[in-house]
Amino acid sequence: MDAPRRLWIRLPRSALALFFFLAFGVGGLVLGCILFPPLMLFRAKHAMRALVRTCYRLFVWLARVTGMIRVVVSPEDRARLASMHGCVVAASHPTLIDVVVLLAFLPDTTAVAKAAAGRNFFYSRVVNAAFLVNDNPLRMLDEAQNLLANGVNLAIFPEGTRTPADAPNRKLHRGAAQIALHSGAPVQCVAITCDPPVLAKGQPWWDVADRVITFTLRVCGEIPVSAPEPGTVPHAAAVALTERMRSLLFH
């Protein structure tokens, strides 16, 4: 494709990307400042999570119908995602909107968010109300255990930050394993890929390629987990479980 034609394809797609970025930010303000306060009065966490997932599904639907993205999920994996209940959902993390795409296909689910996200101007209220903020590890473990025991899924990205698909080293943090071991909840591994790469770490938001962006979700497998037996070393158990996640997600 010649350069002028490529430019005229990219410009409208970049404008569309700007629209989605603005919609995401404004939507966070509307949720946090208008829709969430009445629910907070009644501590309706379930309703707040449902509202967030509905907005994410709308976001993904709009991105699909406008031709910005498409999401590929096999019927079997779609059914597996829909049936997850009280699971630690460990996913790969290639793009900025992985959590949006992932939660759009899951039932009652929250996600672990960085402490910085809880201070973001646009969606801090949403994050602090409907997500699990990683600002106190011990408290987070107990909150995660309570959520999982009540059937809520907990999505977490063990890489900790966005990682390119061709990265030579895949260093995983042990937080997902520690949560699973602390709660005894099973781990469901979900590999997310994005082609062509967009919204990767260090990649500008307007670089959205000149073709439809394909997100693929693949359920790699379940890892049954039980709390460590007395006398075992929690660190060793977390390391072993993290390596098992790595083998399922990236091999």
Image (spheres, rainbow, N blue to C red):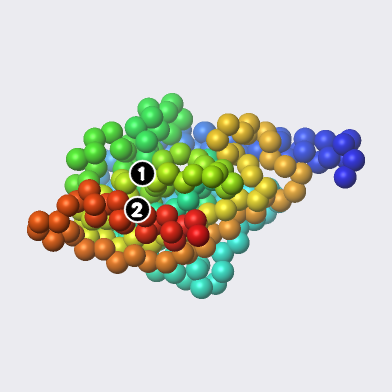
Name the spot of residue 185 as percent of width and height, x first: 26, 61
* Residue at left offset 58%, top offset 35%: 21
The label shown at residue 31 is none
Q: Is residue 56 left or right of residue 182?
A: right
Marks 2 & 1, CB-CB < 8 Å contact: yes
Q: Residues within 10 Å of mark 2 (few under 14, many from 20)?
A: many
Q: Give the amino acid at mark 1.
A: His
Where's residue 34, x and y in %?
41, 36
In the image, what residue occupies the spot 30% across and 51% down?
A: 239
Q: Amino acid at mark 2?
A: Thr
Which residue is identified by label 2? Answer: 242
- 198 or 174: nearer the eye? 174
Mark 1 Cα within 10 Å, few/some/many (few <14, many 20+)? some
Location of residue 237 in the rendering, given as x and y in whole percent from the top left corner: 24, 55
Label 2 secondary element: helix
x%, y% of residue 2? 90, 40
- Asked which secondary structure carries label 1, the reply is loop
Q: With 120 as the anchor, is 151 left or right in this view?
A: left
The foreground one among 222 and 60 is 222
Separation (CA) of disc 2 from disc 1: 8 Å
Front residue (pair 107, 177): 177
Q: To which quarter of the image does residue 12 belong?
A: top right
Residue visible at 88% across and 45% down in the picture: 1
Viewer can see residue 146: no
Residue 208 seen in this snapshot: yes
- Residue carrying label 1: 173
